[in-house]
Image (cartoon, rainbow, N blue to C red):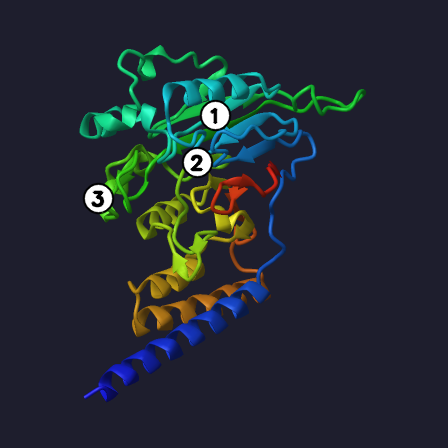
Amino acid sequence: MQQPTINIKTRCRRKLDLTTKLLNLHISNLPALSTSNEQPNESPIRIVCVSDTHNHQPVLPPGDILIHAGDLTESGSFDEVQAGLDWLSSQSHPHKILIAGNHDVLLDEIFLERYPDRRYGETTRTKADLNWGSVTYLEDSTMTITLPTRAATHEPEGVTKGIERRVTVYGSPYTPIYTPSAFQYHPSPEFWENSKLATLPPQDNLIVVTHGPPKFYLDRRDFHRAGCPYLLQEITRLRPRLHVFGHIHAAHGRVDVVLDRVREAYDDIRIGWGGWGTLAWMAVLVGWNKAKRVIGFGKSDASKATTFVNASVVGGRQNELTNDVVVIEL
């Protein structure tokens, strides 16, 4: 009675092995990845990425944009949030962006209505009473930043200033639900389809900031992949230049990925959304992309990479500072 199950598992493993071989073949045929600004008349944009500080205040390197991807606090009390905002505001970065995380309960008023005990005795001061200083808070919203030059804190004397550059930043605090906490959702296609993220078109110099990771990308916790597959769908559609997140402390790091149709098919198969038909289509795409490169047919943007950054700086059971702040230049 158990043999059919074993056969199914064997077939699934064979499919995944073939999928991985196809992806590796495709990657070996790609041109060198573009992970930084290549325009000679433009200064690079230096982005400092940090997340999951949990009341810690690590030393931050200089940059043009400072991004904090949530869990600024441990308990989410008013005093903790205000202390974190004061710390961020004191930084020299011209642009400072913050989203909330599941620990930052003060910023989730709907959650506090359901769980009033998480106000920790605070009866008068609310999110509206915070002094945000020079910090811009994003909650399923976007902002556009114009940078005429690199920040004075790291621009060498005598360097010719570059032309004006703009970046669009989207921020969202939400993570898949696992325990009563702030800004959580039941993973489903509808959640991200109804978000501001779904209304954005693919564009150059797009930065996405979420507290939780997408599926498969810097989301491993023990033997579990904690990322959201539906968030990955949106990221694959948009192919942002940079995606910053945190939440999964053990998965801190950076990875550069080309989110083309081959990678999309590969991820669909890993999630379980694609079968042997998807594998066959993936093989066609790999062959077609290789042929195009050999004969020089068509314009390819396969070298355009998305940089994923899990910027969590704490680790261990006591949330000690263990990881480095990540700096990205675009």
Residue 109 percent coordinates (x, y): 25, 24
The circle drawn on residue 190 is 3
| Residue under pointer 1 | 97
The structure residue drawn at horizontal position 21% and vertical position 44%, both measured from the top left corner, is: 190
- In front here: 241 or 202? 241
Alpha-carbon neighbours of circle 2 within 10 Å: few (<14), some, or many (≥20)?
many
Left or right: 302 with respect to 272?
Answer: right
- Kindly indicate whether the residue at mark 1 contacts the one at mark 3 (C-beta within 8 angstroms): no
Q: CA distance from mark 3 to mark 1?
A: 27 Å
Q: CA distance from mark 1 to mark 2?
A: 9 Å
* Sooner in the amino-acid sequence: mark 3 or mark 1: 1
Residue 120 percent coordinates (x, y): 31, 24
- The three-letter amino acid code for the residue at tag 2 is Val
- The three-letter amino acid code for the residue at tag 3 is Glu
Residue 208 in the image: above or below residue 142: below
The circle drawn on residue 209 is 2
* Sooner in the amino-acid sequence: mark 1 or mark 2: 1
- The three-letter amino acid code for the residue at tag 1 is Ile
The structure residue drawn at horizontal position 43% and vertical position 11%, both measured from the top left corner, is: 131
- In front here: 52 or 301? 52
